[in-house]
Amino acid sequence: MDQFHPDSEHGLPLRAGEQIESASRRCVSNAA
């Protein structure tokens, strides 16, 4: 898990729900 970084989440085989959550959190952080 340590080798994976938040910025690489899109490249990981995550479930659709996890991808949406990650994308939403990034959007909120960028907007803040």
Image (cartoon, rainbow, N blue to C red):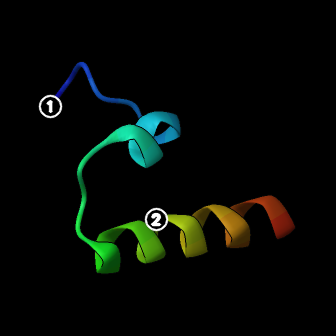
What residue is drawn where x is 58% and y is 75%?
Answer: 24
Location of mark 1 (residue) = 1
Question: Which quarter of the rendering shows the C terminus?
Answer: bottom right
Task: Tell whether 5 sits left or right of 25.
Answer: left
Q: Please state the horizontal and vertical placement of residue 21, each as a whole percent of the image.
A: 43, 75
Question: Which quarter of the rendering shows the N terminus?
Answer: top left
Location of mark 2 (residue) = 22
Q: Earlier in the sequence, mark 1 or mark 2?
A: 1
Q: Secondary structure at mark 2?
A: helix
Q: Amino acid at mark 2?
A: Ser
Q: Nearer the viewer, residue 14 or 24?
A: 14
Task: Tell whether 8 sits left or right of 3.
Answer: right
Q: Check the image and report above or below for 23 versus 16.
A: above
Q: Secondary structure at mark 1?
A: loop
Near mark 2 (Cα within 10 A), the count class, few <14, some 14-19 or many ≥20, is some
Q: Check the image and report above or below for 24 versus 14.
A: below
Q: Please state the horizontal and vertical placement of residue 17, each as a whole percent of the image.
A: 32, 80
Q: Is residue 28 visible?
A: yes
Asked if the residues shown at circle 1 and circle 2 are in contact, with their CB atoms under 8 angstroms apart, the answer is: no
What residue is drawn where x is 30% and y is 43%?
Answer: 12
Q: Is residue 32 visible?
A: no
What residue is drawn where x is 41% and y is 45%?
Answer: 9
What residue is drawn where x is 20% and y is 24%?
Answer: 2
Q: Amino acid at mark 1?
A: Met
